[in-house]
Image: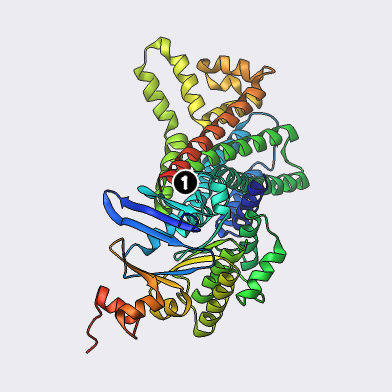
């Protein structure tokens, strides 16, 4: 536990002194602020044009931010020779990886909280903006997406040998899961027999954390009717008492599996040398 | 000789089917200073990296204090301090923060960090970003981290690269003190004069094999008064400088 805290603390120090973190923070805050200004005349309550725009903004920006910060951090350890030196210390691979995940998560969440916080305060001061519950759900969405993709980033950083490979893989994963996903989903579903469409939608949605989190948030915001008939059962379970515990459970599982695979790959490298 | 502190028994290493370490037998006692010498690609760093537990031998065994890395990684690591040759410090951290991170992993605190920074003459610069340090200063930070836990074994890869004559002298003193305290030291070097001054025993490696292993007196006896220089010349050949 002490080692995990030590690794996490180092990661936070490096993260908060990294100019990249501030570039992302400025970008995210600027977008949030712009949205707020555009919407200055209205008051957003539940699922609407403004909240869906904010949802999409977070969906485009945060996964890319998490993927790049996370994967660069791990490949940096390899390129700088720090991991090699750490293997001569009494430090377990699990403490190293989990500590890094926690430290990076804090850095990301501070960026997200700052962007939301500043926009929220300004919105409140100018008297427009978002209803608190809607704003809170959008914040939870942003946090969830960040944590999910940080898990994926750990996997990319584990498999990539250097920052260039990490950059290429991060952009590819981001493009596939965020930009290309709707087209890929339609194409795949179009090739399947009708009976398979619903189960395929379910499986594919669980495989894409961005899509899962988006669906969860849209339903939580009361926009379930906009999703289409394939998702009516989703609306049912997300709104049930089990909706949130299952969603968080899946998130823990997703991040846990990403970290477990990363652990096995790092351990394999350590054992074989 | 079963009680020797460090033992390489028939250690062989291949990378992608290519042999980089042949069949090495090597021992070191507690308090002994052993220098590994040889040209580029002789296998010095590979041997040290295997000893430090960074990479595994393809066959053969390495023991430190009777313990193999495979037996208990944590205990094995607790017995050694390693100074790498190739290391880039993370941007943004000061020397003190960097050292404190390493110290905490060994269950130590700021007091010990200040002590070792003082030893290597960096106590006044501990608050500065370590990435901005000169090569020599960075080497001293790396040396300091290898001393942190006062481990029974110190493994150093080209430790004197980039050190100015003053710190070279201090380094020699610190290593001698560590050996006098019973710490075993294995280091690689291209600088024969450092090996001559510091080591009790010198091991020459060529193409991954030990070609000469002896004390300075034994080498002088075999190669004459010029000792190491002569030995190096006869093993590797020296270029004609005109």
Q: x%, y% of residue A185?
A: 42, 25
Q: Quadrant of the N terminus of chain B?
A: bottom left
User: To which residue does mark 1 refer?
Assistant: A157
Say if B118 sits above or below A237 in the image. below
| Residue at 34% over, 85% down | B226
Q: Label 1 is found on which chain of the structure?
A: A
Spot occupied by residue A161 in the image (x, y as percentages of width and height)? 40, 50
Q: Is residue B43 above or below residue A59?
A: below
Please tell me whether mark 1 sits on a helix, a strand or a loop. helix
Q: Can residue B228 be seen by looking at this rendering? A: no
* Above or below B131: residue A119: above
Which quadrant of the rendered structure holds the C terminus of chain B? bottom left
Seen at 51% across and 80% down, the residue is B168
- Give the left or right position of residue A27, taking residue A128 as reference: left
Instruction: Answer with the quarter of the image where residue A244 lies.
Output: top right
The residue most toward the front is B1
Circle 1: is it few (<14), some (14-19), or many (20+) Cα within 10 Å? many
Q: Position of residue B189 (x, y in %)?
A: 41, 72
Q: Nearer the viewer, residue B142 or A11?
A: B142
**Which color scheme is applied?**
rainbow
For the residue pair A107 and B141, the one nearer the viewer reads as: B141
């Amino acid at each position: 536990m002490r080692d995990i805290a030590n690794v996490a603390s180092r990661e936070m120090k490096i993260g908060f002194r990294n100019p990249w973190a501030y570039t992302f923070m400025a970008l995210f805050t600027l977008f949030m602020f712009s949205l707020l200004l555009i919407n200055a005349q209205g008051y957003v309550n539940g699922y609407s044009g403004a909240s869906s725009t904010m949802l999409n903004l977070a969906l485009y920006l945060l996964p890319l931010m998490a993927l790049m910060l996370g994967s660069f951090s791990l490949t940096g350890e390899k390129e700088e020779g720090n991991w090699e030196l750490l293997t001569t210390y009494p430090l377990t691979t699990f403490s190293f990886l989990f500590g890094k995940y926690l430290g990076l998560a804090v850095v990301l969440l501070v960026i997200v909280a700052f962007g939301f916080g500043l926009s929220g305060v300004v919105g409140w001061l100018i008297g427009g903006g978002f209803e608190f519950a809607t704003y809170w759900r959008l914040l939870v969405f942003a946090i969830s997406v960040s944590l999910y993709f940080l898990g994926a980033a750990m996997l990319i950083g584990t498999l990539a040998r250097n920052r260039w490979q990490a950059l290429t893989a991060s952009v590819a994963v981001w493009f596939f899961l965020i930009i290309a996903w709707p087209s890929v989903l339609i194409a795949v579903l179009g090739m399947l027999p009708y009976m398979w469409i619903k189960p395929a939608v379910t499986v594919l949605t669980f495989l894409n954390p961005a899509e899962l989190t988006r669906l969860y948030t849209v339903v939580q915001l009361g926009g379930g009717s906009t999703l289409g008939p394939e998702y009516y059962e989703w609306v049912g379970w997300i709104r049930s008492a089990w909706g949130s515990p299952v969603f968080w459970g899946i998130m823990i599982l997703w991040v846990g599996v990403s970290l477990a695979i990363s652990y096995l790959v790092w351990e394999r490298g350590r054992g074989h040398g | 000789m079963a009680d020797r502190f460090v033992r390489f028994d028939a250690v062989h290493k291949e990378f992608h089917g290519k042999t980089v370490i042949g069949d090495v037998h090597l021992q070191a006692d507690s308090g002994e200073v052993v220098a590994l010498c040889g040209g580029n690609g002789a296998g010095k760093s590979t041997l040290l990296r295997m000893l430090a537990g960074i990479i595994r031998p393809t066959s053969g065994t390495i023991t430190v204090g009777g313990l193999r890395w495979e037996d208990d990684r944590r205990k094995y690591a607790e017995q050694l301090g390693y100074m790498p040759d190739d290391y880039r410090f993370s941007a943004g951290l000061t020397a003190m923060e960097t050292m404190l991170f390493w110290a905490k992993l060994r269950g130590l605190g700021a007091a010990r960090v200040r002590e070792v920074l003082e030893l290597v003459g960096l106590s006044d610069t501990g608050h500065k970003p370590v990435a901005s340090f000169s090569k020599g200063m960075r080497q001293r930070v790396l040396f300091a981290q290898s001393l942190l836990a006062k481990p029974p074994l110190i493994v150093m890869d080209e430790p004197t690269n980039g050190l100015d004559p003053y710190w070279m002298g201090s380094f020699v003193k610190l290593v001698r003190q560590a050996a006098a305290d019973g710490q075993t030291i294995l280091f690689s070097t291209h600088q024969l004069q450092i090996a001559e001054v510091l080591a009790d025993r010198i091991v020459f490696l060529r193409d991954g094999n030990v070609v000469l292993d002896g004390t300075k007196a034994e080498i002088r006896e075999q190669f004459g008064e010029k000792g190491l220089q002569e030995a190096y010349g006869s093993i590797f050949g020296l270029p004609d400088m005109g």
